[in-house]
Structure formats: C-alpha cells, structure tokens
Image (tube, rainbow, N blue to C red):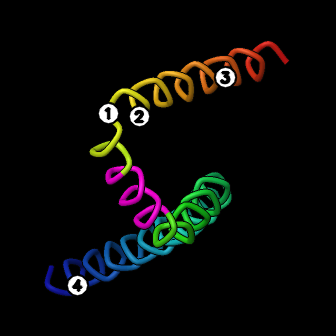
Amino acid sequence: MNKSGHHRRKLRKQQLLKEIQQQRQLLSAYSQNWLETTQSYDKGWQTLLAFKPYFAIGSGIALLYGLRHPKKFYRWSHRIIRILGIVKIVRNTL
C-alpha cells in the first residue's frame, strides 16, 4: 500500500508539472499577444510623454496670457474647442 501511494503521488506530481508547463506556455503566448495589441497605445503614450516639457511651458504661457487678457483668452479657447470639434467630425466621417 505504501508503494502504491508513493506511485500515485509520483504520477500526480508528473501530471501537475505538465499542467504547470502548459500554463506557462499559454501565459507566454497571451503576454506576446497582449504586447502586440497594446503596441500602438504604448507608442502614442511615449509620444505624449516626449512633449511633456513643451506642454508645461505652453500651459504656463497660456495661463499668464489668460490672466492678463481674460476676454481674449476666453474667445481663443472657444475657437480652439470649435476647431477641434470640427476636426473630430471630419476625421470620423472620413
């Protein structure tokens, strides 16, 4: 009985090791698929991060301009929002 129990444990261990190996292979395949799927988003994010210092400088200048000329800043901001909306509509129709 002891030998049969030992034999069963050994078989179970082999079965579990095979299962772990299959899970590792699936995980590797899924991770590769995930990287391929999110590659475009990663590139876009890296591009945005590259412009981070310029955005900080530009927002500071815009803030100072907005404080000194609030009516002009309000008008320009509305124009920019309208232009972005038009660009979005044109892009979606194309």
Amino acid on which disc 3 is placed: Lys
Tell me which segment is drawn in magenta.
55-64
Which residue does the image show at 32% across and 83% down from the upper left?
10
Q: Nearer the viewer, mark 4 or mark 2?
A: 2
Query: Disc 1 to disc 4, how far (Cα)?
Result: 83 Å
Give how far across and how far down residue 3 sits, in percent: 22, 87
Which residue does the image show at 36% across and 60% down from the upper left?
60
- Which circle's residue, 4 or 2, is located before the other in the chain? 4
Q: Is disc 3 surrounded by few (<14), some (14 to 19) or many (20+) residues within 10 Å?
A: few
For numbered disc 3, what is the local secondary structure?
Answer: helix
Image mark for residue 70? 1
Query: Disc 4 to disc 2, how far (Cα)?
Result: 81 Å
Image mark for residue 73? 2
Give how far across and how far down residue 53 sits, in percent: 46, 72
Determine the residue located farthest toward the front in the rendered image.
68
Amino acid on which disc 4 is placed: His
Query: Disc 2 to disc 1, how far (Cα)?
Result: 5 Å
Do the CB atoms of the residues marked 1 and 4 lie less than 8 Å apart? Answer: no
Query: Between residues 94 and 56, which one lies in front from this camera angle?
Result: 56
